[in-house]
Image (cartoon, rainbow, N blue to C red):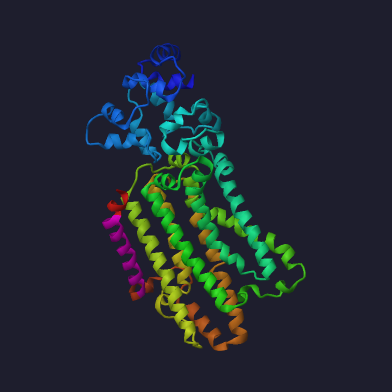
């Protein structure tokens, strides 16, 4: 009865018994394929072409056609706002049925979503474009139709993501144990997150749904492409920084050359005490750039801000560009200082803003990712856990807290002058967030100007890339 209910509004009825009778009269008695069902609309027995559809749509500004293109053979999934705009405005029966899905009072269960999606010929999937071009299965339906419940998303999106990170961590653990180098896990930190983002956005559609690479890429919205590009830029820079530092040093980082490392059972416990916990943290951090791709319709439905926002996009560009600039400046200035073989603690450049500008830049970049989702109409509340988890990790687990504890321990033993400088540095500069006194710092305004330049550049070139 699901198909009949949905067609009720098209044939004028608003009750189940009348709808069933009218549907039987109006639908061709053929195979039930998509061509047969649409035959009555366009006067033939073939699936309508785009020209046929455009002739049926109102001839206004063209916006209506663009919205329907996604539904009839296009590649992009509709946002929540798109779906609401194109729902029929007839008897009200159709609206009543969709009200619970888009803005109503209760979210649909996984069973209701699966019931509402066809399980026969797969013709309905064709209406959603390239995402549903092959044989439908429950996994695909949940991925794209999706459940908006937290449990459903955990089961079908978050847990598979955790499985991916756990598998990569297990491989890395083997390499680390074989080479007796704990720092190998730091190489995995950025590379695993970028890999998960690309696998979720492109890999899954190509491998499991039969799309070509070009079709999978075209299926992404402009804001999703910006998000994926930002994640890739962040990860590649950090991976290069970590890898080059390890190769140059030729031995494990001082943070990992501890007494515990010399214990006989260190490597037997290392996977569970170091590698696996970081896999869990990475799963949380990657939520903003995995969940929207693994469950795009579910995230669009759950988004409290369905309308795309250029203001949110501009703010996201500003935060990401400023954060990325902080990281690049910090890397370059720290490398330059180390090459001087100076006995002084580096407190110049962006290190005059805060003690750990690279960590601040990393946090700003990750805070930008939910804003890209806001602009895309896919800001699921769960994705906010990503930048929060990243911030907590940088501040209180493996970031500035761990770094400074190690510095203080080393300098107190090896370099008393640097130890005194570090104590003074801690009194005058904040660790993570700039103090009010930094509003006169030229480096702060330099970074802000670069962030604003990123916004101007995107505004100038955005229309070209969206075309």
Quick check: is 134 in the magenta stretch? no
Please check the rendered image and state whether residue 451 is part of the magenta-colored stretch, yes or no. yes
Q: Tell which of 262 and 178 is nearer to you.
A: 178
Q: Would you say 378 lies left or right of 120 here?
A: left
Q: Nearer the viewer, residue 389 or 111?
A: 111
Q: Nearer the viewer, residue 55 or 23?
A: 55
Where does the image place residue 93, in percent across and percent down from the top left? 39, 21
Q: Please, what is the dominant secondary structure of the magenta stretch?
A: helix
At 43% across and 38% down in the image, what residue appears?
A: 130
Q: Which image quadrant for residue 453?
A: bottom left
The percent position of residue 317, horizontal first and vertical second, equals 36, 58
- Is there any visible trace of residue 199 in the rendered image? yes
The structure residue drawn at horizontal position 25% and vertical position 29%, both measured from the top left corner, is 58
Place of residue 72 in the rendered image (x, y in percent of width and height, measured from the top left): 37, 33
Magenta part of the protein: which range?
443-461
Q: Position of residue 164 (x, y in %)?
A: 59, 52
């Amino acid at each position: 009865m699901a198909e009949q209910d949905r067609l009720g509004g098209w044939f004028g009825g608003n009750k189940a018994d009348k709808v069933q009778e009218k549907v039987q009269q109006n639908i061709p008695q053929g195979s039930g394929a998509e061509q047969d069902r649409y035959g009555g609309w366009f006067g033939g027995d073939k699936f309508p072409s785009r020209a046929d559809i455009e002739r049926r749509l109102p001839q206004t500004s063209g916006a209506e056609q663009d919205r329907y293109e996604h539904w009839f053979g296009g590649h992009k999934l509709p946002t929540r706002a798109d779906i609401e705009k194109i729902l029929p405005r007839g008897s009200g029966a159709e609206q009543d049925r969709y009200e619970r899905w888009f803005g109503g009072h209760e979210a649909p269960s996984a069973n209701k979503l699966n019931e509402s999606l066809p399980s026969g010929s797969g013709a309905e999937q064709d209406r959603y474009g390239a995402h549903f071009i092959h044989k439908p299965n429950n996994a695909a339906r949940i991925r794209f139709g999706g459940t908006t419940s937290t449990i459903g998303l955990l089961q079908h999106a978050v847990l598979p993501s955790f499985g991916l990170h756990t598998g990569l961590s297990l491989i890395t653990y083997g390499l680390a144990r074989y080479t007796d180098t704990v720092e190998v896990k730091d190489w995995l930190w950025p590379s695993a997150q970028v890999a998960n983002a690309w696998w979720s956005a492109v890999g899954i559609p190509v491998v499991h749904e039969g799309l070509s690479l070009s079709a999978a890429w075209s299926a992404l919205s402009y804001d999703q492409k910006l998000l994926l590009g930002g994640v890739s830029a962040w990860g590649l820079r950090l991976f290069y920084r970590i890898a080059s530092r390890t190769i140059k040093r030729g031995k494990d980082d001082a943070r990992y050359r501890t007494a515990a490392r010399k214990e006989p059972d260190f490597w037997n416990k290392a996977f569970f005490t170091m590698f696996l916990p970081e896999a869990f943290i990475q799963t949380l951090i990657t939520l903003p750039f995995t969940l929207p791709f693994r469950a795009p319709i579910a995230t669009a439905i759950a988004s409290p801000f369905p309308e795309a926002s250029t203001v949110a996009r501009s703010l996201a560009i500003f935060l990401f560009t400023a954060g990325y600039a902080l990281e690049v400046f910090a890397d370059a200035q720290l490398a330059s200082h180390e090459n001087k073989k100076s006995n002084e603690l580096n407190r110049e450049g962006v290190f005059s803003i805060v003690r750990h500008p690279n960590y601040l830049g990393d946090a700003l970049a990750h805070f930008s990712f939910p804003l890209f989702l806001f602009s895309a109409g896919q800001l699921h509340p769960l994705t906010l856990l990503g930048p929060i988890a990243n911030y907590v990790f940088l501040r209180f687990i493996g970031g500035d807290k761990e770094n400074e504890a190690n510095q203080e321990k080393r300098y107190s033993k090896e370099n008393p002058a640097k130890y005194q400088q570090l104590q003074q540095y801690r009194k005058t500069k904040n660790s993570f967030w700039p103090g009010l006194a930094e509003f006169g710092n030229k480096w702060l305004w330099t970074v802000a100007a670069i962030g604003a330049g990123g916004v101007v550049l995107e505004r100038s070139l955005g229309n070209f890339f969206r075309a």
